[in-house]
Image: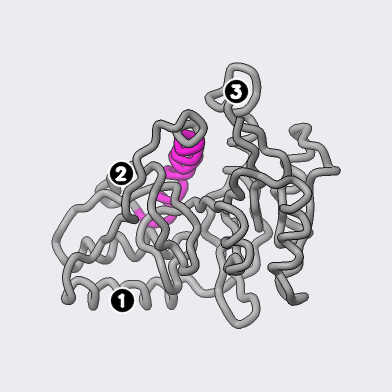
Amino acid sequence: MLRVVNLISGGGSTNLAIIQAENPGGKLDGLLETVAMISSDPEAAGIEKAKNKGFPAAHIWMVNPNKGNLAGQLLKILDKYKPDYFHQLGWMPLTPLEVIARYNGLNQHLGPGGRWMYGIRRIYAHIRFCEITGESLPIPVFCQRVVSKYDEGNTIYVQYENILSGETPEEAAERLLSIEYQVQIEALRRLATDSYEEQPVPKLAINSEEEKILFKVKKEARDKYPFKINKGRQGGPAFALRASAGKDFLVE
């Protein structure tokens, strides 16, 4: 059975879906145990959600990225549990290299990755890229390994979903949320049963001209969806942003 520590920063809805999938009869029953949760925000809505569903408060931990030595804070907790994986589920901070070197990590993601690509910005950038190039490309929803650079780790499982005609980024985010849950759960099932096939992270742009277009629409997405504080509303999609330590991070 895999032992996993889930890392959250906001609403924690994917975290909750995974924990519920571990219940008797669930897709992860007997395959995986969430042994602890770590939140980068003491006011994250995901904390109370988990408690309300019976997750033990003694195994819910807080770290403060603004306090410094995030690696030490995380390792102090992870070393108590020695999990097979930590799983970033709407996790805002960049996980320090010292943590990645000691523990295997997984990350929840969809759409384009890299600089500025958090929350709804990813869906907006994907839609605008397709509009400019004249292509109708499905958006990838995936679970990937955590590496030193944002969103560049190989995928454990990926599912491609069409953006519906006339669908706004907000509407797509709402619709894709339950699919995000399913993808993370399926990736964990495949890891636990050693039935996964690791693949490079999906790339939207395939040549230098498309790279320029992608960079342009990423900047558009950044400007269209500026920072705003959101602790994570009940059941809502992961698209709010906030500023932290001079960088922008996702709040689930």
Q: Is residue 137 above or below residue 147?
A: above
Residue that protrudes farthest toward the top in the picture: 25
Q: Is residue 82 above or below residue 188?
A: below
Mark 3 vs mark 1: which is more N-terminal?
3
Q: Which residue is mark 3?
A: 29
Q: Which residue is mark 1?
A: 215
Horizontal side of residue 137 vs 126, given as left or right: left
**The quarter of the displayed image where residue 3 is located:** top right
The residue at the point 51 percent across, 74 percent down is 226
SS state under label 2: strand
Q: Is residue 4 above or below residue 251?
A: above
**The quarter of the displayed image where residue 170 is located:** bottom left
Residue 217 percent location from the top left of the image = 31, 73
Q: Which residue is mark 2?
A: 160
Mark 2: amino acid: Tyr
Mark 3: amino acid: Asp
Mark 2 vs mark 1: which is more N-terminal?
2
Indicate which label's residue lies in the foreground, 2 or 3. 3
Mark 1: amino acid: Phe
Start and end of the magenta stretch?
A: 168-188
CA–CA distance in space, label 2 to label 3:
26 Å
| Badge 1 density bin: few <14, some 14–19, many ≥20, Cα 10 Å | some
The residue at the point 60 percent across, 23 percent down is 29
